[in-house]
Amino acid sequence: KVMAGASADKLLTAISRGGLVLGGLAVVPSTCLFDVDGGQRAVVLNMMTGVEDKVRGEGTHFKVPWLMQPKIYSIRLRPKLIQTTTGTKDLQTITIHVRMLFRPDVAGLPTIHTTLGEDYDERVIPSIANEVMKATIAQYNAEQLLTQREHVSQEIREAIVHRARQFNILMDDVSITHLTYGKEFARAIEEKQVAEQDAERQKFIVAASEQERQATVIRSEGEAEAAKMISEALKEHGSGLIEVRRIDAAKDIAEALSKSPNVMYLPQGQQMLLNVAGGGRPQQ
C-alpha cells in the first residue's frame, strides 16, 4: 500500500507539471507574440530604452511582456478633406475645398510616434493645409483663380507636399474640389456677363443698320441707273418705250382681272339689262 501511494503521488506530480507547461505554452502566444496585418507597420516602445528605431513589417513578431509595447500604424492611403475661407489679393472672400490622399513615411514612423503620436494627421495636416491655401490664394485676384485654376492647384499641391514631408507624411495627391466665391463677386460676374451680352447686341444692331444703309445706297444707285437708262431710251426712241410699258401693264391687269370670280365682261357698245331682282317688270 505504501508503494502504491508513492506511485500515485509521482503520477499526480507529473500531471501537474505537464499542466503547468501546457498552460504556460498557451499563454505565450497572447503575451509574447503580436501580429502585424497587411497595410500596417508596428513601432515598439521599449520601457527601458524608449521607442526603437526598427519598424516591424507584416507578420508575427516576438515581444517581452510588459517590457515591449507595440503600436500599430496604418500605411494605406487615406483621404483628408480640408475646407477654409480666405481672402484674395483684391479682397474678395472665397471658400476653397482641398482633398488630399496621404500616408505616413514608414522610415519616419518612430519619429512620428515620438513627436506627434497616433493622431498625427489631425495634428499636422489641417494646420499646414490652411497655412498653404491662405498664403497661396492671397497672391491672386478672384478672376485669376478662375482663369489660372490649374496653375493655382499645382502651386498649392507642391507647397503642401513640401510642408508635409517635413513631418514624415507623404502626399500622393492634392486637388482642389470646390472653389466658391462670395455673393458680391458672383453678382459682379453676373452683371459683367449681362453688360457683355448687351454690348454684343448693340454691335449686332449697328452691323445690321450698316448693312441696311449699304443696301439702301445700292438700291438707290440701281434705281438712278435705271432712270438714267429710261431717260436715254426716251431721248433716242421717243414715246415708243412708254407705249410698250403701257401695253405690258394692261396685259398684267387683264390677266389679274380674268382670274377674279367677281369680274364680268360686257361687249362694247351694247346695252344689256341684268335681272338682278329675280324677275322682269310687267309691261303696261
Image: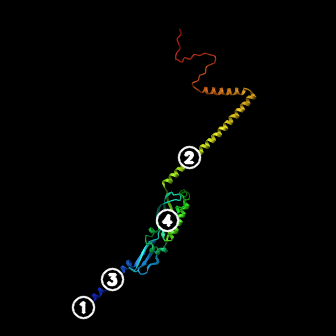
SS for callout 4: helix
Along the horizontal axis of the image, is 212 left or right of 240?
A: left
The residue type indicated by label 2 comes to Asp
Q: Give the CA distance from mark 2 to mark 3.
A: 95 Å
- Residue 124 - label: none
Q: Give the CA distance from mark 1 to mark 3.
A: 27 Å
Instruction: Name the residue at the right extreme.
Output: 236
Q: Nearer the viewer, mark 1 or mark 2?
A: 2
Residue at numbered disc 2: 198
Residue drawn 61% across and 41% down?
209
Q: Give the CA distance from mark 1 to mark 2.
A: 122 Å
Residue at numbered disc 1: 2
184 or 202, which lies in front?
Answer: 184
Tell which circle, 1 or 4, labels the residue nearer the N-terminal end. Answer: 1
Residue at numbered disc 4: 131
Residue drawn 30% across and 86% down?
13
Q: Give the CA distance from mark 1 to mark 4.
A: 88 Å
Along the horizontal axis of the image, is 47 left or right of 284?
A: left
Q: How many marks?
A: 4
